[in-house]
Image: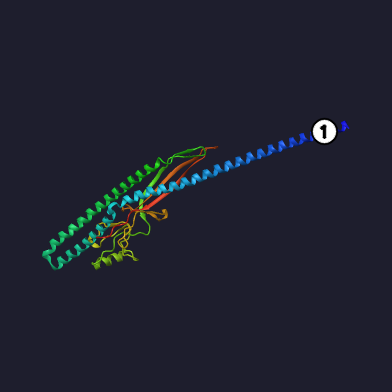
Amino acid sequence: MSSCTNKLGSKGLRQNRKFSTQMRCRNGSVLVLAMIVIGLLAVSLLIGYSYGGLFFEHNRLQASANEMALAAARKLNDKDRIGQMNNMIARNRQLVFAGRQQFDECKEKYPGLASLAEELLDESRDSAKTLELQRKQLSIVAKKEAKQAMEKKFEEINKTYAMYLPWMKVEEPLLAGWQCGRVVNTESNVEVLKNIAELEAHDQEQNYASSAGMKLYKHDIDAKLPDADGDLTFKIAALSAPVMKTVAPARIILNANYDSVVGDNLPSACRVKVWLPVGTGLGPNASSKMSCIGAASATGGSTQQ
């Protein structure tokens, strides 16, 4: 009896030991599995955080490019200088045309007044030449001041980007380039001047004016006069016209709505391109450059006086 009891006790002990071993193996497997799952979750969170960070930096870079373009565009038509130049050119053009008509009439009907009419014509022609020189100078000054405003804004935001995390590195942005141009489908701010039927007919024949909506001179034209005054230059730039005496504010535009200007025509919009070097901080080193383009339109022309 005692021998049987001992055999049963030994068998039970062996079963207990076997069960304990199985439990330890099972617990160890669960622990390993749990560590693997935690590791995968950590990697997933790291990747998700990195992509989220890149998405955030891209949006931030786009906002910065827009701010820089807007700062430059605001400076272009500072104090309505482009709008006033357009208006002065259009009025001086009308003055030259009227002066030529008066001179021709005086030669034919009032010869005694022909010399006085010629002096007035010469004065208006000289004014046109002076205006053209001033327009060219304004083009240089406006672009220079716009660039300075853009660079100042770039310096303000440049130092706020650098970020070095264990999983991501963001360096300072780089200025890839900038341009001055105009907004597509935008004519000048100058309404077609009336009261001289012959000039209106000439403008219509030369297709200098828009045909829909407000009768505005078209953008970036050299509105040449006929015959003897065809040597003069009357370049009218693109600029938003006031609507119901409301001046269009400087504003962000889509890059697709930006267009270049030809030659030395006065600009009314700016475009800026920036790069942002980014890279990974863990594992194999991988780096790239984010690229964003911002575009903005200048403040529109004021109401004609």
Residue 214 point in image, percent of width and height = 32, 65
Q: Which amino acid does label 1 sit on?
A: Gly
Pick the quarter of the image with the N terminus: top right
Residue shown at the point (67%, 39%) measured from the top left: 30
Horizontal arrangement in the rendering, residue 274 relative to residue 35 (left or right):
left
Compared with 242, 283 (above or below) is above
- Per the image, the residue denoted by label 1 is 9
Residue at x-position 57% and y-position 43%: 44
Look at the picture and state if 145 lies above or below 214.
above
Q: In this view, does 43 lie above or below 123?
A: above
In the image as oriented, which residue stretches furthest toward the front? 1
Secondary structure of the residue carrying numbered label 1 = helix
Q: So how many labels did they put on this image?
A: 1
Query: Based on the displayed image, in which of its 4 quarters is residue 299 positioned?
Result: bottom left
Residue 36 image point, x, y percent: 63, 40
Q: Nearer the viewer, residue 113 or 9?
A: 9
Quadrant of the drawing holding the C terminus: bottom left
**Residue 55 spot, x, y in % from top left:** 49, 47
The residue at 72%/37% (across/down) is 23
In the displayed image of the protein, which residue is found farthest to the right? 1
* Residue 52 in view: yes
- The residue drawn where x is 43% and y is 46% is 61
* Image coords of residue 293 (percent x, y): 42, 49
Left or right? Give the position of 73 relative to 29.
Answer: left
For label 1, the crowd category at 10 Å Cα-Cα, with few meaning under 14, some 14 to 19 and many 20 or more, is few
